[in-house]
Amino acid sequence: MKKLLSGNEAIARGAWESGVNVASGYPGTPSTEIMENLSTYEGLYCEWSVNEKVALEVALGATVVGARAFCTMKLVGLNVAADPLFNAVYSGVKGGLVVLTADDPSRHSSQTEQDNRNYARFARLPVLEPANSQEAKDFVAEAFALSESFGTPVLYRTETRLSHSKSLVELGDRVESPEPFVINRDLSYCILPAYTRTRHAEVEARIRAIGDWAESWEGNRAEMRDPEVGIITCGVTYQYVREAAPEASVLKIGMPYPLPRNMIATFASQVKKLYVVEELDPFLEEQIRLMGIPIAGGKDLIPLENELNPRIVAAGLAKAAVTVNTSLLVDTPPPAQDLPPRPPTLCPGCGHRGVFVALNRIKAYVTGDIGCYTLGALPPFSALHSVICMGAGVSMAHGMDKALHEKMPEKAQAPVVGVVGDSTFFHSCIPEVLNTVWNNGTSVLVISDNRTTAMTGGQVTPGQGCALCGQESPHIDIAELLRALKVPRVRKVDPYNLKEVEEALKEEIAAPEASVIIAEAPCVLEFKIKGVPYVVDPEACTGCKRCLRVGCTALSLTAPPEGKDKEVVVIDPAFCTGCSICAQMCRFEAILPGGEN
């Protein structure tokens, strides 16, 4: 039976068909839907772990007893999981272990567009990369077979376009894990110097053996057409190459590392000019050049950054006089002019809004983090000044506080506040808070707790009292956890009460000890919160636009009413949730409750 599936849906199906026993991950676009889909299948255990490092360690633990384990994360998550990943290459695995990294060329929803194929070469583990939804499903089974045959973790790389595009997939049945689960007490998983002195040589021998195996693996294949031009490519870029240069001979690489060196040399000998087309880094190109094979064009023709498409590939190859699909070279019409900008913004009624309005008003320097609240950096809030990685909002505030304390003992002279969300707090911030307390820090942290992982679609957190598959679990109270960490000052505020938030910030900034403010307000989108909308009295509105500083899309300006020479604000009742933030900003009592729900 065939079914139209996205790449992520196909990967989930492939994991289930492959007999996966344990699946773990952390939500992050473009990988999130894999675990969400996989959790709907029966016969396996799935969990959202608190972060990617933990997720990989959970999966690795499952392999100790011979289970097949699957771990998912987005590109930057692999940075968090790098420690257990590198060590798992040395320990090897008993059950199959596949680690999926979803890269994000063009940074559609990521801080960077790092190319995680480089992790494969760095750690010495094989990486597979599918080109369509059918391969996305099939390559999962191939990855598990490879992992179990060679006793190694396998990196499975996908990226945004493949994750979210759809194509037909031939479905199969589930195949159960071949071995019974047993606890073997050997020391193969003990990464101690006495047991790892020979492991490096063994890892290098293993990756060479996998390279030999790759020579006959059908995921790598040569498609001979016009011998004048040969193109080596991999992943979804193969689709772009086929559309851009349909007559060219193509070597499609499904395993970017280790490369099938003999296959590449043979293909190169069969074409007059060889080109390499790949997204992001010159990963294939550099390895092929090191083999001594001349390349007519690579990153000198194809951009190093951002996502590719058939038009970009055709334009790049055309520079080298390669025959391409000329219909792709037609200039696209220019974008419409003079359109108003539409920057991303917080949802109407979002609890993060009150926090950033207050932070803006006290002119704090804010060390932020990854999540919806990152939008606090944009106007009209302009109240978030650093975003580095998950957890850094806490540690950077501590570091700035320590540095400033030497020159400016009075904190009120330079208020520094860290801001994180509840999901990020559970992901990365507990050690950071502990570090602040341990080192007698005096920084201020705001945890904007909306009871969900909102940025990636509302996934559950340890603070919700349930897990991925809906089963009941302990509710982790953030305030109790902070007190257990000996945080000297912990208080809760209502982020919809601007006065309360602002007073709390000023008091904690002035305090001589570390403090945490928990701003509790459930996500209005995830929990479908809708109150009585507010309305604007046009007679009382002066058009001062002060209420617009809250950045709510429910508010807009309209033409001056009769008898007035200034625009006035109106509120769209379909968007307004009745949070009252705008009403608190109004100095003329022109915004009042009373709209129709």
Image (cartoon, rainbow, N blue to C red):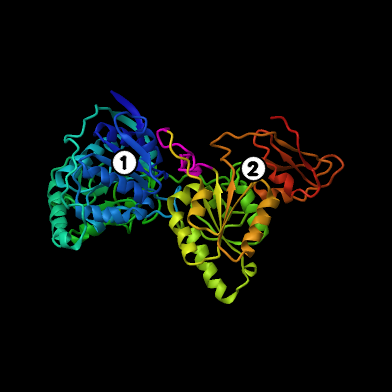
Q: Residues within 10 Å of mark 2 (few under 14, many from 20)?
A: some
Measured as percent of width and height from the top left, residue 76 is found at 39, 52
Residue 582 location, quadrant: top right
Q: Residue at x 48, y 53 (%)?
A: 484
Q: What is the secondary structure assignment of the residue under circle 1?
A: helix
Whether residue 458 appears in magenta in the rendering, the answer is yes
**Element on which disc 2 rests:** loop
Image coordinates for residue 427, horizontal then vertical, percent? 43, 50
560 lies left or right of 157: right
The percent coordinates of residue 331 (x first, y second) are 45, 46
Viewer-proximal residue among 369 and 470: 470
Q: Earlier in the sequence, mark 2 or mark 1?
A: 1
Q: Amino acid at mark 1?
A: Gln
Magenta segment: 451-471
Left or right of 577, for residue 273: left
Query: Does any portion of residue 310 appear in the rendered image?
Result: yes
Predominant SS of the magenta segment: loop
In this view, the mark in front (2 or 1): 2
In the depicted view, which residue is nearer to us: 115 or 487? 487
Q: Are marks 2 and 1 in contact (CB under 8 Å)?
A: no
The structure residue drawn at horizontal position 72% and vertical position 30%, both measured from the top left corner, is 596
Q: Nearer the viewer, residue 414 or 548?
A: 414
Q: Residue furthest top?
A: 1
Mark 2 → mark 1, Cα distance in angstroms: 39 Å
Does the magenta segment cover residue 158? no
Give the number of the disc on residue 96.
none
Front-most of residues 475 and 96: 475
Residue hosting label 1: 239
- Residue 461 sits above or below residue 487 on the image: above
Where does label 2 land, which residue? 553
| Residue lying at the far bottom of the rendered structure | 407
**Label 1 CA crowd tier, 10 Å (few <14, some 14–19, many 20+):** some
